[in-house]
Amino acid sequence: MDTPRAHVPRDHGTTVFSTKADDYQTARPGYPAAWFDALAAEGLLARSTVVADIGAGTGLLTAGLLDHGAQVTAVEPNDEMRAACDALLGGRPGYRGVAGTAEHTSLAEASVDLVTAAQAFHWFQIEEARREFLRILKPGGQVALVWNDRLGDDPLHQSLVVIMEEAGGVARQAMLSQENKAGVPAFFGGPYRTLEHAHEQHLTREGLRGLLFSRSYMPPRDSPAGARALAEIDRVFDLHAEGDTVRVRYRTVTMLGRPA
């Protein structure tokens, strides 16, 4: 299959999140209850389900999968993110954390019922990841590629985009070119389904700061560019706050199927 090689930055997320684990864990959204219910209704999520959560980060999706009784291996290349995931979930039944990537998970052949990848697909080398997922999936196993997409017509989102464009610069533009899901058809190489669920989170001022600074392209908080971004985030928070929080609205989008 002819797959564009420029789809994924070479870093694979191995180093760019090393200073962002705290912001990621405290401010990124989890996933809606309706998402887990939908997978359960399709027979893809139950107490007997073995899941590989690829690019698990600090365990935002992993935690929800464990809540539903799945046996979950969190595969994460970044040491700091994986340590945060282990600290959060390491004592829970059914959890295991391993160092690995989408292309090299270290998991056994035909050992997994479901592969999940939340907010991580843009780091994949598509063809290599596709081969690896087919290797570790059991017959009939499925892949769920998941995104929490902020709503484009939401006024808060529009204000945040202005901040991220200014602070993220060229690095943000490069990342956006990879995040448009254009590689999904090549990854599946055949039919797949799209699921959508409404989702939202309520963030304090510090939470909104963390949400933006958890992005890989955002500058350090203590840099001049970071200080300017902080001031703008606080201004946007004051503009959109409902009491002590702002409401961030999402559409959780899932591409579900088995690679051909």
Image (cartoon, rainbow, N blue to C red):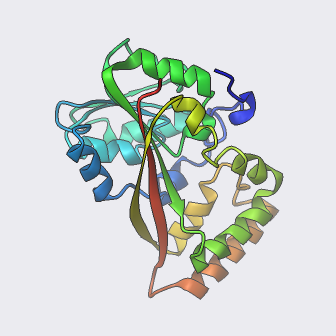
Indicate the position of residue 81 as horizontal and vertical percent values. Answer: 51, 39
Q: Quadrant of the N terminus?
A: top right
Indicate the position of residue 166 as horizontal and vertical percent values. Answer: 79, 65
Residue 232, picture quadrant: bottom right
Which residue: 60% across, 80% down? 155
Which residue: 59% across, 20% down? 128
Residue 77 appears in the figure = no
Instruction: Name the residue nearer the viewer: 37 or 59.
Output: 37
Is residue 147 positioned above or below 232 on the image?
A: above
- On screen, residue 80 versus residue 7, left or right, reads left
Is residue 131 positioned above or below 195 on the image?
A: above
Instruction: Name the residue nearer the viewer: 33 or 11.
Output: 33
Indicate the position of residue 212 as horizontal and vertical percent values. Answer: 61, 62
Residue 138, picture quadrant: top left
Is residue 174 positioned above or below 5 on the image?
A: below
Which residue: 56% across, 76% down? 154
Residue 167 appears in the figure = yes
Q: Which residue lies furthest to the left in this view?
A: 47
Q: How many marks?
A: 0
Indicate the position of residue 28 as horizontal and vertical percent values. Answer: 49, 57
- On screen, residue 97 versus residue 18, left or right, reads left
- On screen, residue 152 versus residue 161, left or right, reads left
Instruction: Name the residue nearer the viewer: 223 or 61.
Output: 61
Q: Which residue lies furthest to the top in this view?
A: 109
Is residue 62 positioned above or below 108 on the image?
A: below
